Structure formats: structure tokens, C-alpha cells
Amino acid sequence: MAYDKPIPRKGQHTKPFWDGAKEGKLVIPRCKECNRVHWYPRLICPYCHSMDLEWIEASGEGWLYTFAVQHRAFGPWAAEVPYVTAFIDLKEGDRMMTVLRGVDANKPEDIKIGSLVKVEFEKADEDTYIPFWRVVGDV
Amino acid sequence: MARADLSYAAAIVGACESNEIGYPEERGPKVTSLQHHIEAIKNVSDYTGIPISDIEGVFSAGWSSELCEHLGLRPKYIDTTAVGGCSFQIHCHHALAAIYAGIIDIAVVSHGEAGWSYRGQTGRGGGGGEVSPGYEATAAYGTFGAPSQYSHAMVRHNHKYGTSPEDFAHISVVTREWATLNPRALMFSKDTNPFGGPITVEDVMNARVISWPLTLFHCCLVTDHGGAVILTNPDIARSLKSNPVWIRGAGESMGHSNMVEMADFTATSAQHSARTAYAMAGLSAADIEMAMIYDSFTITAGMTAEMLGLAPRGKGYTLWKEGHAAPGGRLPINTNGGGLSFNHSGMYGMQLLVEAYRQMSRTAEDGVNGIEGKQVDASNCIVNGTGGTLSTTGTLILEADDA
């Protein structure tokens, strides 16, 4: 089935991320000065303010920081309610948002903060593969 | 550096609302945001006796040039800071500084927002792009407005501190109790709204789920509102027919813009804006006698009470659960009925200011906005606005003239 959800418009400095996603890789920015990764992609390191940045392939693993269950949505997402949205702490550092997979939205009490999660990519259009995170292990 | 010399450098000398707040279209034609602004400014001008033409500084969340043009003003100071619902606390901070510096003597802070009348006319979802890489990184993930974001903070707070949605439901219940003392509150009674009148924790928990664990009654209203306050230097403040309320402390800060950048989902920048305000005031949290705390959601209020030092971390909700925040309690909070039960137009910071002025100017029982029992026995009030997605905060410490 064709992807029918909103597709983010791509910025001018985030191409390495989207190119990586197309190959199934999570590519994120890292500062060559202070060695810290950050998300979302900046024009400048938000920690040390160096502009000497590079892109690295991340492990694609992390932990569930927090979540919520959406019962009210609009457009194509409305057909999916209830679904779980979440924030993921990357193993390399910093945080990403996602719609969480591998969980039962009707049993939020069974979803455990700290669970191990892995990234996967869904094709939205020819150039856009959107990262989603899936719970793969216990706390 | 704490600027103690700014303490008492300006006073709020009046605070008024527009004529039709809540759901105006149920009573007549739709009201525009501009009309809310203009009515509120006219009302506060009449209330203080300060002619609109004497206003030198205009502060609003994005509207200042339009307001000046509409009013035919030639201002000396223009500030149109728009950082969400706390913008109006921040405007007062800026106006305080401008008055202290001698650039202006009279400032208006104005708000007009047809949050209900023109609901659904803004875009939803999708988008993103080079101007907002933070949005680009989150637009795909099916969140729609504030409730779908703030729920994540509630879950994290529950996890970190062992709290529960029921704990936070007490905030709704107590805030509703205050609304039953305010005839202008949308939820004043069954007559003002089918869902109005007193509610229980069970009512809150059994209400429709919006974004779990937030039910409808954990969420603020969506209404129309306009409001305006005038600030002046101390000499003018003492010469007017209205009562001055002193700005004893002020501060502002921000943690992030996009929620994905929020470092700790159980902490906001109110801890920093409050620290600045306390330092300016020479006060600590223990000295605070009442509070007006932005309650876009129960989690916002509970967490902010912790940030302001009014309760230990993880224990903010106990102020409501144990009745301290309720009518007759030792620390009244959100005495207008809050964004939860009085009025919330989208940016609620002006409603906080209007009520704080009424309490501190000893006029809470006067006129259309209060009935007996509403005026609280407090000589100071901490006011904290929260804007964006728990992003930006402005804190004021106001003091009654008879303190």
C-alpha cells in the first residue's frame, strides 16, 4: 500500500541523513571538535559551537525514554488510532522521535520505559525512507 | 547578576479583558483576535484613567505594529515577542526593564486570540523544511498539537517519580472548584456549560482519552480571550484611581523549542526564570502566598509547581491533592479556575496576569469576575507562564500595595 502519511519536506543540509535512510542506515551528525553527536541536524554543534561537523553511521539502537498513546489524530493518521508515539535515546547520545513499533497501543501499562529499541526504515516515496523504532528487548 | 534595583521599578496598574470571552459566537457574531485586543486595551484605559494616546510602549505576541497602527500610536518602544503562552509574562519583564531604563513611563501588554471562533483554520501536520530542521525531524510521527506532546511528559514523570495520572487528576478537580467561584469561567456551572460545575477524580479519569494518559479533563479548554494590562513607573502608579500591583521580581528563560530537544521531560526552564525572579525580589519559594501557574494540562501545572520550588521534585501534585491549592488552602493556586476550567485561548499567559492583578489589587470579588469567597488572603503572587511544548517560561512575582 502506498505510504499516505505526511512526508517531511527535506532541508538543504540534511541530505546525508536521507541518503543514508534510503540505504537502511541511520546517519547522524557528529562534531569533529567535541566528538558529540546531535539530533536533529544543525548547521553548528549545539554543544561547543564548532562548525566542523561530520556524518556518521549510528548503531541504530537505543532505549525508550518516554511514550504516549495517541487517541485523537487527523488526516491519514486518524485511521491508525490508537498508536504509540515515543522519544528514543540513541546509544550514541541525544534523542529522536518516532511512532513506536512492536508494542500494543491498547496495553500501555505493558510498555516499559528503558526497553531496547532498534531502528527500521519505511519507504514513503522514491527518495524518502522514514525511520521508525521498534521495541526488541526488555529493560 | 540579580538586578535587585529593578524590584518595584514598575507596577501593573490595571488588567482587563475583552467584552466577550469563552464562546462568543453562542451569543452573537464571531469576534476577531484584533477586536479582543482593542476592547481589552480600551477597557484597561478606562479602568486606569490613562488615555490610550499616553501609551508609549506596546508589547504583544506578534501584533504590536498592527495595534499601533490601529490605535494611531507613535510608540517609543515596540516589542512583539511571540514565544507562546508565556509571552505576556516576558512582555512585563521587558516593560519593567524599559521603564526602569527611563525609555518609557507607560506600557501596555495586550492579548487577543479568537482561539475558539477561528478554530481549525490553521494547518495540521505535514510540512517541515529547511527553515525548521526540528520540524523536519518530527513531522512524520503523528502528533497533533499540544496534548499529543505533553502526554509524553506525564508518562516520564510517572516513571521517574512513581506518580500516577490519578495524582494529577486532583489538579483538575481543585481547579474546577475555583471555577465555581468565577461566573466568567466556562465551567462555572451546568448552566454555563453541560460539562460545568464540580467534578471528581473519577470524572477526570473516565473522560475521553485524548493522548494517553491525558484525558479530556487533564487538558485545557479552547476558547476566545482578550486581555490587556498597563504598567507604569512608580510615580504614575501612585497617582491613579486604580490600585497598583508591584512587580517585585521577574525572569525569563527557555529550554528548547521542539520537544525532541527537551533534556529532561520532568523539568522546564521555569526553574531558571524563577531563580532570576526570586533573586530580584529577594524572596524564596517559602515566602510565596499564592500562585498563578500555567495549566495547559495538569502535568504543566504540577511540574511547574516543582520548578518554582513550591513543592519538592516529584511532589508538585500534592499541593492540590492535599488541598493546599484549593479555596481556603494555605497556597491558593489558579484562583480564576485556570486554563483547565476558566478560559484558555491558546496563549493563556494573559489570563494569568489579569487574575493575579485582581487578587493583588483586592478587586477579585468586584464586578463580573468574582463572587464572595474568591478574594484570597495573600500579599504576593508568583505568576508563571509556559509557552510552546514546555519550552519557554516567564516568571513574575507580584506584590499587593498593602503588603
Image (cartoon, coloured by chain):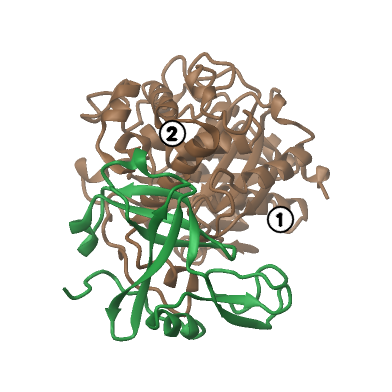
Q: Amino acid at mark 1?
A: Ala
Q: Left or right of B165: which side holds B270? A: right
Q: Is residue A11 above or below residue B195?
A: below
Asked whether B114 or A29 is in front, the reply is A29
Indicate the quadrant containing the C terminus of chain B: top left, top right, bottom left or bottom right. Answer: top right
Res B121 label: none
Res B338 label: 2
State which chain is coloured green.
A
Asked whether B297 or B371 is in front, the reply is B297
Residue at the farthest front position: A137
Q: Position of residue B281 (x, y in %)?
A: 76, 37
Does residue B47 appear in this view?
no
Q: Position of residue B321 (x, y in %)?
A: 48, 20
Q: Position of residue B359 (x, y in %)?
A: 55, 27
Q: Are marks 2 and 1 on the same chain?
A: yes
- Per the model, the C-alpha gap separating discs 2 and 1 is 30 Å
Q: Chain of mark 1?
A: B
Earlier in the chain: of badge 2 and badge 1, it is: 1
Q: Is residue B29 above or below residue B203?
A: below
Which residue occupies 38% across, 38% down? B343
Asked whether B76 or B196 is in front, the reply is B196
Q: Chain of mark 2?
A: B
Q: Residues within 10 Å of mark 1 (few under 14, many from 20)?
A: many
Q: Amino acid at mark 2?
A: Gly
Query: Is label 1 in a helix, a strand or a loop?
Result: helix
According to the image, label 1 marks what residue? B98
State which chain is coloured brown.
B
Q: Is residue B287 above or below residue B264?
A: above
Does residue B156 appear in this view?
yes
Which residue occupies 43% across, 23% down? B174
